[in-house]
Every structure is written in C-alpha cells, then in structure tokens.
Amino acid sequence: MLDLQTPYSDLVTEEQLESIQTDVHWWLWPASALYFAVYPELGLPLAKLTSRDAVWHGDRNVPLVSLTFDDGPDPVYTPIVLDLLATAGIRATFFLVGDRARRYPDLVYRIREGGHEIGNHGDTWTFSHQLTDADFELDLIRTEGCLGIDGPRKLFRPAGGVLRRSQSAIVKRHGYETILATGLPFDAFGPPAGWIAALTARSLDPGAIVALHDAGGDRTQTVKALPRIIETARRRNLDFVPVGELPREG
C-alpha cells in the first residue's frame, strides 16, 4: 500500500515506473506533432463531424475538467492511479472493460469506493465499429450487467473511439451518452511522460475531457505524467469532476 500522506508527485517508486520497457510506435511522433500543431483549433471541429451525437467536452465557460481512464482495471497500474487521485483529492471516470472487471472485481469495488464514476467500454475490447449491430448490442448489455451500471446518466466510450450511425442509435436506446475527449495524448502507445503531459496541456481548458489509459499495456509513462497533468490544471485554476458531473454545453 502506498503512503497517502506522501505528496502525490512522489507516490510512485522508480522500480514501479521502470518495470516495463516502453515500445513507441513509429507513427506516434508525426501523429502527435500534427495533433499538437492543429488540435483543438482545426482537429476537433473535423473530428466532431464523425460523431455528432457524442459528448466531446463540457461547458467551455465553467472551470471544470474531467480525467478519464480507459481499458481497466489493471492489477498493476489501476491501484497506482487510484492512489495518486486519492492523494490529490480528485474523482475521475473509469471506462472499464467487462472481461477485465470480472477478473479484478476488487478493483471495480475500490474504484467505486473512491467516489469515482464507472463507464462502459465494452466487454472484450474489440473495436466497436468492427462488431455487427447485434454483437455490439450484446456486448454493451453484457458489460452493463457486469459493471452494475444504472442511474439517470450512463456513460459509454467506444473501443477505438468510432461508432457507426446504427450503433450510436443502439447506445441511445439503452440510455447511454457516448463520451469522447478533447485531450488525446496517445498515451496508449507509450510516449515519454513529458510528451503525454505536453499534449494534454494543449487542450486542458475549461470543459476538457482527457482520455488516458490505466490498462491494456505498459502504462508507466501515463503514471509518470499524471501528477504533471494535475499540476497544470491547478495552475490554470481548473477543478476536476467526473464526466457525469461536467456541465454540458447549452
């Protein structure tokens, strides 16, 4: 157990952070550079054309932002993320995969007990748009049952970030909002922590939704970047809330 009295920037040991070597995909750098140069001014309006029904960000006039974590839970990285968030006094949204939740129910319980929000990220992390409509609906329902998702506001994030129009209709029919993001630091591919923090800072304005990953691979650099992201937001006088509490535009 990590000492929650320790400043959150010092919570993670070097042994934990360096336990796995980072494998950076060759296309990450040009893609990230393009993102840094044009997003959100040009990239976000174009991206919105592909998913008109999704929530990309909250009210731009309210100084609140949301941290989200995809693909968990993970027995190595999710506890570290939870400790960092607890020490910083932040509640976040975790988009969980049903198969992983069944393997690590204690972590699902801990996420909820920490006051965090749980969203639906599919059952097996197959790209959502690659599923037939029937399989997609079964996947959505199976994950909902596994995670115990209910209430007036249910949140879904598609695996891979893309849905067909017919799938968007299924999501709506089951009472979900589709949640995407404005802060996309490509952390799933393991770039250095400084690059993750810099890309996130590029879009860390009122209403931002930041998409990070606490599972699905080596998340060492994400864990390293998280305190820097928190510090940047606080320097900008932004507070953190789960996505369900983020005021919507209009």
Image: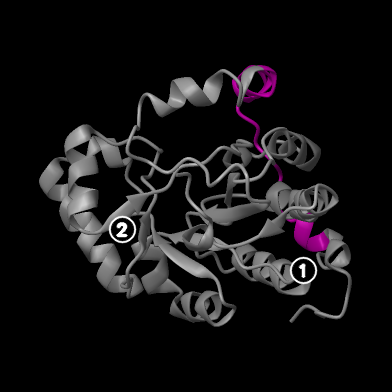
Tell me, yes or no, if residue 10 can be seen here.
yes
For residue 187, what is the image quadrant? top right
Q: Which residue is labeled 2 in the image?
A: 123
Give the residue drawn at x 69%, y 17%.
Answer: 37
Q: Is residue 177 left or right of residue 25?
A: left
Q: Three-letter amino acid code at disc 1? A: Ala
Which quarter of the figure is the C terminus placed in?
Answer: top left
Q: Nearer the viewer, residue 248 or 164?
A: 248
Q: Secondary structure at mark 2?
A: loop
Q: Which residue is labeled 1 in the image?
A: 88
Mark 1 vs mark 2: in front: 1
Give the residue drawn at x 79%, y 56%.
Answer: 227
The picture places residue 151, in percent across and down from the top left corner, at: 32, 72
- Whether label 1 touches label 2, CB < 8 Å: no
Q: Three-letter amino acid code at disc 2? A: Asp
**Residue 83 part of the magenta-drawn span:** no
Upstream in the sequence, badge 1 or badge 2? 1
Q: Residues within 10 Å of mark 2 (few under 14, many from 20)?
A: many
159, above or below 121, in the image: above
Q: Is residue 56 left or right of residue 208?
A: left
242, above or below 208, in the image: below
Tell me, yes or no, if residue 18 can be seen here.
no
The picture places residue 109, in percent across and down from the top left corner, at: 48, 81
The picture places residue 211, in percent across and down from the top left corner, at: 56, 46
Give the residue drawn at x 47%, y 40%.
Answer: 56
- Residues in magenta? 15-37
Q: Residue 224: which disc? A: none
Q: Nearer the viewer, residue 110 or 16?
A: 110
